[in-house]
Amino acid sequence: MRTFADWAFCGAAVEERRIDYDYRRNNRLLIMKNVPTGVCRQCGENYFKPDVLKRMDQRYHDIVDRIQKPE
Ligand SMILES: [Zn+2]
């Protein structure tokens, strides 16, 4: 199993946190609340687990599909 520590490119410790993340895609902005993320203590870089990224992607499509669905 991969831990957050495996992701840090700089090799520093990564702290697990929940953040509100601005998910931007195709000029749309979606605020993702309480997103689990790893934050590097050295460079402040954010790391997301693949399943978290997938969930944000699905949420994005859910919302966009609903908006664009014709009546
Ligand atoms: Zn780092």
Image (spheres, rainbow, N blue to C red):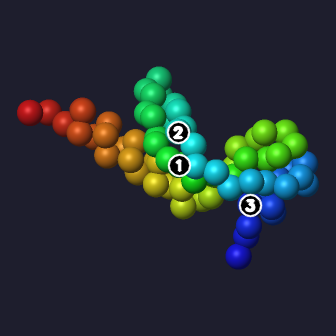
Which image quarter: residue 46? top right
Determine the CA span between mark 1 and mark 3.
Answer: 14 Å
Q: Amino acid at mark 1?
A: Val
Determine the CA span between mark 1 and mark 2.
Answer: 6 Å
- Nearest the viewer among 34 and 50 is 34
Furthest toward the left, the residue is 71
Q: Residue at point 73% right, 47% down?
A: 39
- Nearest the viewer among 38 and 2 is 38
Question: Closer to the N terminus: mark 2 or mark 3?
Answer: 3
Determine the CA span between mark 2 and mark 3.
Answer: 18 Å
The reply to whether the C-beta atoms of the residues labelled 1 and 2 are less than 8 Å apart is: yes
Tag 2: Cα neighbours inside 10 Å, few (<14), some, or many (≥20)?
Answer: few
Label 3's element?
helix
Which percent across, then down, holds residue 48? Answer: 64, 52
**Which residue does the numbered mark 2 point to in the structure image?**
20
Q: Amino acid at mark 2?
A: Asp
Q: Amino acid at mark 3?
A: Phe
Which quadrant: the N terminus? bottom right
Label 2's element?
strand
Q: Residue at point 24% right, 33% down?
A: 67
Q: Going by the image, does 21 lie left or right of 38?
A: left
Q: Residue at point 58% right, 49% down?
A: 18
Q: Going by the image, does 60 lie left or right of 37?
A: left
Q: Going by the image, does 34 lie left or right of 4?
A: left
Q: Residue at point 45% right, 28% down?
A: 29
**Which residue does the numbered mark 3 point to in the structure image?**
4
Tag 1: Cα neighbours inside 10 Å, few (<14), some, or many (≥20)?
Answer: some
Mark nearest the camera among 2 and 3 is 2
Q: Going by the image, does 40 lie left or right of 65?
A: right
What label sits on residue 35 in the rendered view? 1
